[in-house]
Image (cartoon, grey):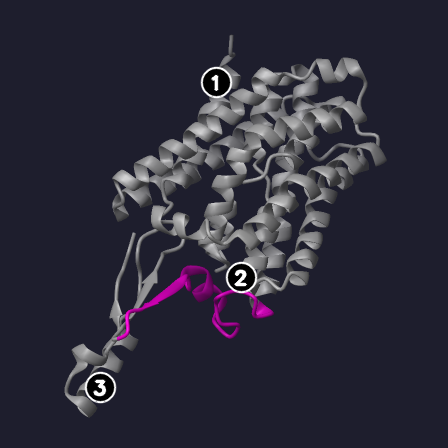
Amino acid sequence: MLTLTEITGNLLLFFLVFGMSATVDIHNLQSQLKNKHAILTGIVLQFLVLPLLGFFVVNALKLNHPMGVTLLVVTSSPGGSYSNWWCSLFNADLALSVCMTAISTLLSTIMLPLNLLIYATYSFDDEVVHSLDWKGLFTALVTVISAILLGLFTSAKRSTPEFNIFANKLGNISGILLVMFSMILTSSDSESDLWGREWVFYIGVAAPCILGLLIANIVTTGFSLDKPERITISIECCYQNVGIATSVALTMFKDDELAEALGVPLYYGMVEAFILSIYCVGAWKAGWTKAPVDEEFWTMIAKTYEVSKEDDGSCGTEMIGENNAGTAIKSYDAQVSDAEDQKNNNGSPRESASAYTLFS
């Protein structure tokens, strides 16, 4: 029977994933399914490269049972719910990010247990492998998949700006509460305090994230993917769903081992946030994002450049998606100016001006 701690962790995980999934535009998700080259590259990096990096780190540094198993779960759990937020915030390929998150989470039902079984078997003795709580693992996976499906279904049925904003806030608040919940449980034992551990903990947990980001950039650049796609795939590769690892740790470990295990997803989450902040700002300044490199920083953060155009032969259609909420924003200054110029020259602004469609 699930304890109150386990129920609380899984509920927060559910609302986190549901909130993020409910902001997804179904039509954009469907169109990105055709981008097979980028998606396959991301899948290989997520399910082969990063779990292998976790395995190498666990064995090279001889991490103990709670720390090693939890790190293997972290590196085998792609599709972090906040990866979409990072791609939106720094103007990478947001639609690709949402598509990869949905696909990777569904594939995790097979690949996460498979990777964990393989690497745990070669990292620990049979007793440790047999003690793995597969019920807790699948409970976390079912929670995530249910939240994604329900979020996408709800988004399709109630695609309104008000609902998208509400869902996004629900996901953000749940994510913050899940982190705070982990911090409270982690600090429950003074000897297992997050900042009072051996150096192998900090190096071991951070290494897969940093190496994964580096390898992803090398691979995507070698395949000559579009620069915003490179950023998205790199983020998706190293940004893991630490919520799954947190829920698994809550189910698998008790007392001192629980506090030690919970420190892994908590610290990994801090590392990925810090590393990605530096990476995304550098990518923006290098001209890899959709935002102009000479834009003011706070303007770039607040404004979206997620633009797709459809040409019907007589006019263009630009669709702009808002960061974090999925609602439409677009400045009409340029539109009005263009229409006035065409009116002065041709007297027919309706025929020559671009038609702008806003979507949520």
- Residue 209 at x, y percent in the picture: 68, 45
Residues under labels 2 and 1: Cα distance? 38 Å
Left/right of residue 244 with respect to residue 56 in the rendered view: left
Q: Nearer the viewer, residue 310 or 181?
A: 310
Q: Quadrant of residue 257?
A: top right
The label on residue 228 is: 2
359 with respect to 82 (left or right): left
First along the sequence among labels 2 and 1: 1
Mark 2 or 1, which is nearer the eye? 2
Mark 3 or 2 closer to N-term? 2
Image spot of residue 95 (x, y percent): 44, 53
The residue at the point 36 percent across, 56 percent down is 322
Relative height, residue 98 to residue 11 (above, below):
below
The answer to whether residue 349 is above or below residue 13 is: below
Tag of residue 342 = 3
> Residue at image x 19%, y 79%?
351
Number of other residues with Cα within 10 Å of mark 1, as a class: few under 14, some 14 to 19, many 20 or more: some
Looking at the image, residue 47 lies above or below residue 337: above
For the residue marked with disc 3, what is the amino acid?
Answer: Gln
The residue labelled by disc 1 is 7
Q: Of the residues under marks 1 and 3, which one precedes in the sequence?
A: 1
Residue 264 percent coordinates (x, y):
67, 32
Direction top: furthest residue: 1
Q: Which residues lie in the magenta part?
A: 285-313
User: Residue at the spot x=55%, y=32% of the render?
Assistant: 243
Picture quadrant where residue 197 is located: top right
> Between residues 33 and 217, which one lies in front from this camera angle?
33
Mark 3, secondary structure of its residue: helix
Mark 3 to mark 2 CA distance (whole Å): 33 Å
Is disc 3 in contact with disc 2, using a CB cutoff of under 8 Å?
Answer: no
